[in-house]
Image (spheres, grey):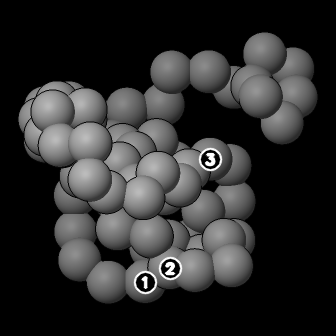
Amino acid sequence: MTGESDHLPKMSYEACLHKQEEFEADGSEEKTHHSVPSPLLLSGTYIQKGQGWFICIVVGDMTCEG
């Protein structure tokens, strides 16, 4: 995903929840805001590689970029 200082992989919601559970169970990892993957794509995101499906849930003034 572009628009970030690092390219970030995206995973399904279920996979992200599983990674979150693993992360919380293992307290030895250093915690950063990229420690657990996110399934969210923001406006203006470009896909660098791979394929997938997405659902647009908010448009216009109601987005976080609004």
Q: Which residue is mark 1?
A: 48
- Which residue is pictured at 47% across the width and 51% down the height? 31
- Which residue is pictured at 34% across the width and 68% down the height? 9
Q: Residue 7 has which mark?
A: 2
- Which residue is pictured at 31% across the width and 57% down the height? 29
Q: Is residue 53 visible?
A: no
Amino acid type assigned to the residue bearing label 3 in the image? Leu
User: Looking at the picture, how far across and down is residue 30, in whole percent?
Assistant: 42, 58
Q: Between residues 56 and 26, which one lies in front from this camera angle?
A: 26
User: Looking at the picture, how far across and down is residue 57, in whole percent?
Assistant: 51, 21
Q: Quadrant of the C terminus?
A: top right
Foreground: disc 3 or disc 2: 2
Amino acid type assigned to the residue bearing label 2 in the image? His
Q: Element type at marker 2?
A: loop
Between discs 3 and 2, the one toward the N terminus:
2
Q: CA distance from mark 3 to mark 2?
A: 14 Å
How crowded is the residue under tag 3: few (<14 C-alpha within 10 Å), some, or many (20+)?
few
User: Looking at the picture, how far across and down is residue 17, in whole percent?
Assistant: 20, 30
Between discs 3 and 1, the one toward the N terminus:
3
Q: Is residue 31 above or below residue 45?
A: above
**Cβ atoms under marks 3 and 2 closer than 8 Å:** no
Foreground: disc 1 or disc 2: 2
Q: Residue 42 has which mark?
A: 3
Q: Residue furthest top?
A: 62
**Cβ atoms under marks 1 and 2 closer than 8 Å:** yes
Between discs 1 and 2, the one toward the N terminus:
2
How crowded is the residue under tag 2: few (<14 C-alpha within 10 Å), some, or many (20+)?
few
Q: Is residue 3 visible?
A: yes
Q: CA distance from mark 3 to mark 1?
A: 14 Å
Q: Element type at marker 3?
A: loop
Q: Residue 60 has which mark?
A: none
Q: Is residue 11 left or right of residue 2?
A: left
